[in-house]
Amino acid sequence: MLAFYTEHGISPVSQDISDLARHLQRRESLYRLLGLPSLLFEGRTILEVGPGSGHNSLYVASRKPLGYDLVEPNPKAAAEIAALYDGFERPHTRPRILLTTLQDFTPDVPYDIVLCEGWLGNSDADHRLIRKLGGFLRPGGVLVLTFVPPVGGLATLFRRLLTLRLLEGISDFETRTQRLVEAFGSHLATLEAMSRPHRDWVQDNLLCLAILGQAQSPDRIGATLGEDFAILGSVPGFQMEWRWYKALFGPARDFNGVFRAAYQTRLHNLVDYRLAPTLREGARNGALETLVGQLFAAILRLEVSGATRPSPEIADLVALIRDNLAPDLPAITLGIDEVWPLLGQARVAPAEVAALPRFSSWFGRENCYLSLQKESA
Ligand SMILES: C[S@@+](CC[C@H](N)C(=O)[O-])C[C@H]1O[C@@H](n2cnc3c(N)ncnc32)[C@H](O)[C@@H]1O
């Protein structure tokens, strides 16, 4: 990802902050849902790794933490953050911008809160970095991470397959970006609350390879951090905690186990952000998550190979995923049935993609959040 950003001299992660009050309230809502009310930031020491444009950091800075460190290795992003704070007029704590990677960063003292949003994935190297982040916290401190649940990324996988066909024979980066905005702009326009420019979204989600290596179950993050970390919250929320608090001591607390079980029976809802959540058999969802995870890997291999048409392996996986979803979520299969024939056409034009009646408004929950508290010794 970093190589892609620096190669093209971009930082395609900006937010619409033209209505600053709205932007700050969105961030407040996110942290509230994760179990971090605004008070928790005040007077604390906070680290954020990979803040990108820095737009999201404005909320944390405005809560006046004692100290706020931003670790950002992309020089373009670091320069944008500095300029952003020069013009930020609300009372705030000005962050220290550290132009370095997480790999090369070692803090002097532990932090109360560590935030890392939108880039760590499922490789072993990334899991070593997740463990490293956990080591930066003091006991009782809170870690906020994002993850791409495979099922939440399914709609994007179909857009990536369409992208390969749409960009056949086009190598210029700006022309590629424009063509994708033309094809997918009408899809993105259906997301009323979207706050990222369409250009940024297509560059980050459809042109950059990174997302294909990010899909993973939150179970894996839990396993990496171990029992020293207990899940505090998630966005979206998976469980309703209905246990009597007086019974929650010793091994019975098991916050991670309760979260895992809730995730397993609800993960199918991630497939479309418009769904009202239902429950489904865990084994069926486990199979779905595995299949979509395999589809992520197969599309990564396809893109790296330079091929532009779905391989037989991808066709088989799509058929199995469709079969898994069909009994409970027939509306999703209608979207798949629109895209699949298009992918086999001699040529695919942006106008055809833009006009897909069912598929165009299908987006999954691909950017999910976890907050975890480091157990006190
Ligand atoms: C997809 S952007 C997310 C930006 C922001 N956190 C957000 O959610 O809008 C990923 C960010 O991580 C940064 N990044 C990538 N590799 C990194 C590394 N090894 N160490 C620290 N930051 C990294 C990128 O430069 C970029 O700013």
Image (tube, rainbow, N blue to C red):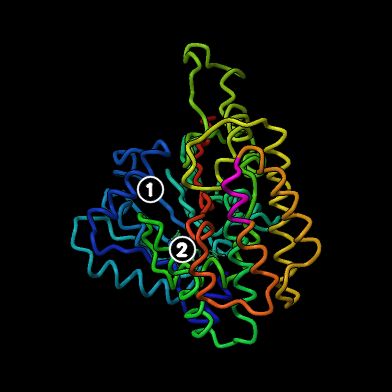
Left or right: residue 135 compared with residue 181: right
The image quadrant of residue 58 is: bottom left
Q: Give percent across and percent down for residue 346.
A: 69, 79
Examine the image and state in which quarter residue 80 appears: bottom left
**Residue identified by numbered label 2:** 187
Does the magenta run of residues contain 45?
Answer: no
Residue at left offset 35%, top offset 57%: 57
Compared across the picture, whether 32 is left or right of 232 comes to: left
Q: Nearer the viewer, residue 241 or 98?
A: 241
What's the residue type where badge 1 is placed? Thr
Ligand 1 contact, mark 1 (Cβ < 8 Å): no
Comparing 37 with 153, the one in front is: 153
Span highlighted in magenta in the image: 329-336
Residue toward you, 254 or 12:
12
With respect to residue 187, does 293 lie above or below? above
Can you identify the residue that label 1 sits on? 45
Task: Nearest to the eye among marks 1 and 2: give it.
Answer: 2
Q: Residue 108, how many percent across, how many down?
A: 47, 54
Q: Residue shown at 42%/43% (left/top)?
A: 112
At label 2, which amino acid type do we have? His
Name the quarter where the C terminus is drawn: top right
